[in-house]
Image (spheres, grey):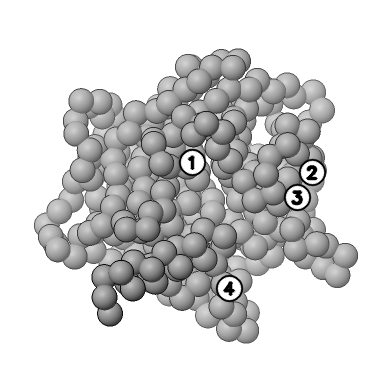
Amino acid sequence: MTAKIKRLALGIILAVLTVGGVRTIYPSDSQDIIVRRLALNPDNATQRQVGALEFIAAWELRSRNEDFGGISGLVSLGNSRFVGIGDAGTVIGFRLTEDGRINGSFIAPLPNVHGPKVHYKDRDSEGLAYDPDSGQYWVSFESNHAIRRYSKSFAQQTGMIRPAILQKLPRNKGAESIVRLQDGRFIIIAESLDDDMHSAWIFSSDPIESTTTTTPFTFRPPAGYRVTDAVQLPDGRIAILNRAIGFMQGFTAKVSLLNPDSIGRDRVLSADVIASLAAPLLVDNMEGIAVTSDGNSMFLWLISDNNFTLFQRTILMKFRLPDQPDSKKPEA
């Protein structure tokens, strides 16, 4: 195969993946998730540093369940437990043991997004936020733009709103990221770009409640990238996951840090990039980010959306984040 044909084939594959891919279905309702350890750099088994981040471990997650995959948001529940949101209206939960095994896994549909009277556009779930005190979850949806709130353990939907500010967004470029801050405010970042910048809003409280107010701002991601998820760190900073797709380099990702105190009405903000993932390093369609802590150490967890295709994988990666990363340190 000539180099030209290879580039053409790669371009076709990436074009398919950009619009969601071709879903491959193997009917199964298995609740099992199997895991396989992966290397960060197949060309350099000793590499541990990626910019300011220290690589800890990585795994490929797989399941026979036809609804497993498409993970677009991830939150930590503590005690090594995680919940992800699949972009087909699915909740995916698991516990990762110290020796790298998965137990307590489940794969289930979100309440109120399946059924004969529900349109498939109403289950395009993208962002996930969590309140550890109440156990409540908030999920952002694109296509039919909405924010839904769920009770503890996703037992039931407790509220839904279609904010007017979201209805102006393109159908498949809606509220990609939703973050609940420690003080009860929420941040939403849209996937769509206008002049290479994202529309974003900070909500004064629960976005479902009628008393909340919104403050618009604009976020400028790294050139050529889009925001796919974000999470607030224990020290208050916001870690942002940015992803790009290129014809030659395939998928790449960047992690950046933002000070929430800089957010203000109509401000244009950017964040400091602290790490980059690109071939030959392990990387895929990175769409979810979560944070855990152990003593004074903070850990970032990244997960990829496999778009339900045979060309991609669900990859979970763990990195240690310094308390105060040196902003002058070069990227990997």
Label 4 packing within 10 angstroms: few (<14), some (14-19), many (20+): some
The numbered mark at residue 9 is: none
Residue that mark 3 sits on: 144
Residue ID at (19%, 65%): 42
- Please state, as top left, top right, bottom left or bottom right, where the C terminus lies in the image: top left
Label 1 packing within 10 angstroms: few (<14), some (14-19), many (20+): many
Residue ID at (53%, 80%): 64
Going from the N terminus, do you reach mark 3 or mark 1 first? 3
Going from the N terminus, do you reach mark 2 or mark 1 first? 2
Instruction: Place residue 155 in its image quadrant.
Output: bottom right
Note whether 303 is above or below 327 in the view shown: below
* 230 lies left or right of 172: left
* Closest to the observer, 243 or 109: 243
* Closest to the observer, 179 or 96: 179
Label 3 packing within 10 angstroms: few (<14), some (14-19), many (20+): many
Q: Amino acid at mark 2?
A: Met
Residue that mark 2 sits on: 160
Which of discs 2 and 1 lies nearer the camera? The answer is: 1
Residue that mark 4 sits on: 23
Quote the CA–CA distance across marks 2 and 1.
24 Å
Instruction: Place residue 291 in its image quadrant.
Output: top left
Which of discs 2 and 3 lies nearer the camera? The answer is: 3
Residue that mark 1 sits on: 227
* 167 lies left or right of 248: right
Q: Amino acid at mark 1?
A: Val
Quote the CA–CA distance across marks 4 and 1.
23 Å
